[in-house]
Amino acid sequence: MRVLLIGSGGREHALAWKIRQSPIVTALFCAPGNPGINTIAESVEIKATDTKGLLKFAREQSIDLTIVGPEQPLAEGIVDLFEENGLTIFGPTKAASELECSKVFAKEFMKKYAIPTAEFRSFTVAERFDAERYINEVPIPIVIKADGLAAGKGVAVCETKEQALEVLDMMMEQKAFGDAGLRVVIEEFLVGDEASVFVITDGKEFIILPPAQDHKRILDADQGKNTGGMGAYAPAPIVTDQILERIRHAIIKPTLVNMAKEGRPYRGCLYVGLMITETGPKVVEYNCRFGDPETQVLMPLLDSDLVTLFIDASSGNLKRTIKFKHQSAVCVILASGGYPDSYETGKHIVGLDVAGAEPDVLIFHSGTKQTKEGIVTAGGRVLGVTALGQQDDLEGTIDKAYRAVEKIAFDGAYYRSDIGKKGVERLKQRQQMETR
Ligand code: AMP
Ligand code: GLY
């Protein structure tokens, strides 16, 4: 198998690490890759969004399987393009990736098929006054979401009506997200704990990966601004077996069955972002790809061949046999000081080898660059440090991850110090209930 992976983040490094272990892979290319990925895959100087360039490369290099990491190429229809040209590619078509690319589509779809999600209404620019009236009618807090892709920045949780009106103005009048904000979803604020559930599907059959929890805010105790994700752990005890069954029957099955019914069969990885509320799990958002940093904890937990799984899913032959290690995994993200606002780059990173030599520790690169003098920072999220440990000892796994993190240094390095803490508290609560 000659495999092409598209993307350049920590998610892709974790995927590449797992793909590399496949006994059926003879060559692995990554476009464009990063210095971490480039130690295990051959880097290809083509941008992830250059779908035509990628098609040309895949044909010339007789690529047997292409795997898409980020959402942009999916939104541009890379899967349709490759399939029209007879190539095998893992990911949803343009029509299926609407579940992520249009929040209005996703919400209308969930409403039509009674999939649990926050109450909402959607508005176009022409309906701006109706949107303002709606904001004044409904209780706060409320959540406003730009319809289209906005690099994770198109969602605002508004604590006051004034703030909501400002956000509406910013999206519709000042066009802060371009066309993506010309339609908006205004929805009810959901209270609960968030969880990420990933599904690998061929459109009919599906496999659910262990539930994970991301840490989206920049500061400890979920304070401060939203980021791409500051750390993750899996399995997340908030998603009990009972809750997972509800997610399977009330959310995942109806999503896949009805996407097919709508003429948009969903193949690839479906990321279901959930709020576990008092009345059960509800969908916060769908994404049409793997999540980052969740993938950095899920790949090390997978005990089956990823490439076979991708080929089976891409060709409509998914078998429901897949194994996971009975372990826990924790990933701590090291970020550039200042992120998610502006930050400096080009800082020398030391300690990568020492940290990477720790037992049960993996280092995945996100925003790094190779220079003559060594590896330097080149992005907001710089590295992901993942540790593996016993499943019932999440605390021990967290300690292992932080011990490795402390061996890495660069000017301005920042990380949250409470990754996984919520999971530890949940496990303790559960143990107390069981002994009662
Ligand atoms: P999204 O990009 O839709 O995942 O939204 C980003 C973040 O905003 C989510 O991870 C949640 O923390 C928060 N969020 C989005 N929608 C809601 C909601 N309806 N209720 C509460 N929080 C939300
Ligand atoms: N973990 C958040 C995301 O990948 O969108």
Image (spheres, rainbow, N blue to C red):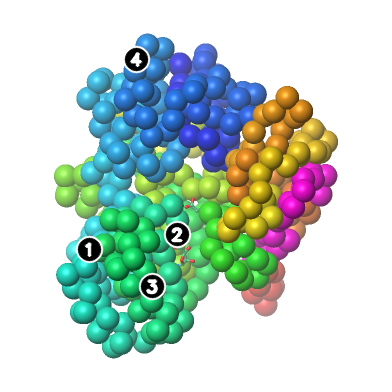
Viewer-closest of 186 and 177: 177
Question: Which dot, 1 or 4, sits closer to the camera?
Answer: 4
Q: Magenta part mainly helix, strand or loop? A: loop
For disc 3, the marked residue is 167
Magenta stretch in the rendered image: 404-422
Circles 3 and 1: CB atoms closer than 8 Å: no
Which residue, given by chain and number where applicable, does mark 2 sit on?
153
- Vertically, is 84 above or below 384? above
Element assignment for label 2: loop
| Whether residue 386 can be seen here | no
Occupied quadrant, residue 202: top left
Dot 1 or dot 2: first in sequence order is 1
Residue identifier under label 1: 108
**Amino acid type of the residue tagged 3 in the rendering:** Val
Amino acid type at circle 4 is Arg
Cα–Cα gap, marks 4 and 2? 36 Å
Vertical placement of residue 23 versus 285, above or below: above
According to the picture, the residue beneath numbered tag 4 turns out to be 59
Q: Position of residue 384 (x, y in %)?
A: 65, 45
Tell me the distance, in whole angstroms, between the alpha carbons under discs 4 and 3: 46 Å
Give the distance between the C-alpha atoms of the residues marked 3 and 1, in whole angstroms: 22 Å
Q: Residues within 10 Å of mark 3 (few under 14, many from 20)?
A: many
Drawn side of residue 249 relative to residue 40, left or right:
left
